[in-house]
Amino acid sequence: MGLTIAQKIIKNHIVEGDMTPGTEIALKIDQTLTQDATGTMATLNLKPSASTE
Amino acid sequence: MLAMGAGGLDVAVAMGGGAYYITMPKMYKVNLTGKLRGFVTAKDVSLEILRILSVKGGVGAIIEWGGEGIKTLSVPERATITNMGTELGATTSIFPSDEITKAFLEAQGRGADYVPLESDPDAHYDKIIDIDLSTLEPLIACPHSPDNVVKVSEIEGTPVDQVCIGSCTNSSLSDMLKVAALLKGKTICPSVSLSVSPGSKQVLSMLASSGALGDILASGARLLECACGPCIGMGFSPNSAGVSLRTFNRNFQGRSGTKDGNVYLVSPETAVAAAVFGKITDPRKLGEAPVVTIPEKYAIDDSAVIEPANADDAASLEVKRGPNIKPFPDSHPVTDEISAKLVLKVGDNITTDHIMPAGAKILPYRSNIPYLSRFCFGVCDEQFPENAKAAGQSFVVGGTNYGQGSSREHAALVPLYLGVRAVIAKSFARIHAANLINAGIMPLTFENPEDYDKLAQGDELCMSDIFAGMDSGNITLNNKTKNISVKLNCSFTDRQKAILKAGGLLGYTKGE
């Protein structure tokens, strides 16, 4: 069966699980964006394990 | 690209190179036919799908927009539609990447980034919805929910106190140029205050250099920063019981900063009509619909973008924390035995707003967990923060549907800071249970809900053999004060057990 656009993108990023609806999957993330009010906390979380990717 | 909203901890893990965990969504498709008529906009398309599906209709699904009608929609219009997909509860929304996408990227100097994307002809969808663009009319979402949608013409004449144009949903250059064209040569109604927040530095500078900004300002509009501003109650809170028409995406009660404010969601065109006439007005009464085309070249100035430091310099960089930027709370890995006091017992349907209230008074302290902790559970028990701190480590007991409401992760981080090690409830809201686990706090349920009555605030409690209990799903809670025991249940995945034993998602990710 063919894939939807979203399924094509998920297929290219899935690192755990399979594409069965309702089950847990893990995705590799290419890009993150944060918002003014909540981004600071997210960045503080990041600091000790920063990736250079 | 699939773009999904996520809590800060999950974003931090992704920034660090870790995976992002979601539930594999179902697939919905919206087929568009026809073409929008004058003064009917992409915003009205998003309001129409909210009218059809409701704010819960997209839960667990990704919404794909397709059909011949999408060829009539520019990238900024598509962005308005997908942006508001969040209000459907959808995991995300997406359009195909086509020649219209290509032209937009080229105009942004990013032609090389273009990748065509479309679904296969035999792709399966769990639900298909058809919308004929040519039959739509200007729509409006009434207080206090984005799916409370009617035609603008149905509520014409309602006096309006305030109009706000901008936000993530409607602040593109195209939107702003339409607003400027409609306001040109006009003065807004004296009883209305109008704010305009352009979407970005690029939008604002192109508005200024084209002269359109002058038309907006001359009408009596006040220019705000390129930010969320009024949408999250930071400025421009409506007058008491006032009526505010906004091009934003949310109109939840009190979000504007005025508890009895009446916020309506509309297109920029309908917003201008209300600002000019001082009452809710069908925008088609403004005369000729403005025609705005995407510029061939956007003004590109990336001079303010700071490149990441190279690996050698990164180690010596110092994080400068002002007085309101405090470190993340210390983690506390779950141990095999935990003795703690029951410092707070609450009832059913405790929301994340009970646990960690929001609003202009508290929002500026989002990065200051110690300060925020003073407000934790304030509406339930003002003494809770002090009692929890005095106890060192503690348990909280709740009724059914504990943690309902938003995904606000501060509702887990602040209890972590205050020493909460487990929340025992009759049942949990799904996202909050996940956030508790991410913070290293165990969400546990009563095997027998009536055992809720056997625990009283102030009791000294103890759980032992927790690790074996995590595996079997049964943990025994001893009430040392009353000398009785209560059976608790849990159902953690192996990953969740590992997260709890690592003291939360951050520790788990670092350890991997």
Image: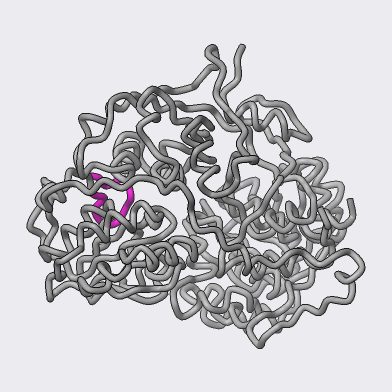
Count of number-bearing discs: 0
Residue B298 at x, y = what percent? 48, 53
Task: Residue B262: name its quadrant.
Answer: bottom left
Type of secondary structure dominating the magenta stretch:
loop
Residue B138 at x, y = what percent? 20, 44
Is residue B7 left or right of B267 when viewed as pictured?
right
Q: Does B72 sit above or below residue B377?
A: above
Q: Nearer the viewer, residue B106 or B92?
A: B106
The color scheme shown is one colour
Residue B249 seen: no
Is residue B329 left or right of B150 when viewed as pictured?
right
Residue at the spot 20% in from the left edge and 57% down from the top edge = B182
Residue at the spot 16% in from the left edge and 50% down from the top edge = B283
Residue at the spot 28% in from the left edge and 25% down from the top edge = B34
Q: Does A25 sit above or below residue B243?
A: above
- Is B15 covered by the magenta stretch? no
Residue B59 at x, y = what percent? 48, 38
Residue at the spot 72% in from the left edge and 42% down from the top edge = B491
Q: Quadrant of the N terminus of chain B?
A: top right
Residue A13 at x, y = what percent? 72, 35
Q: Does B338 sit above or below residue B48?
A: below
Is residue B137 left or right of A25 when viewed as pictured?
left
Residue B148 seen: yes
User: Outermost residue toward the bottom?
Assistant: B323
Q: Nearer the viewer, residue B347 or B6?
A: B6
Task: Residue B264: name its quadrant.
Answer: bottom left
- Is B145 covered by the magenta stretch? yes
User: Which residues, given as a range, are shown in magenta?
Assistant: B140-149
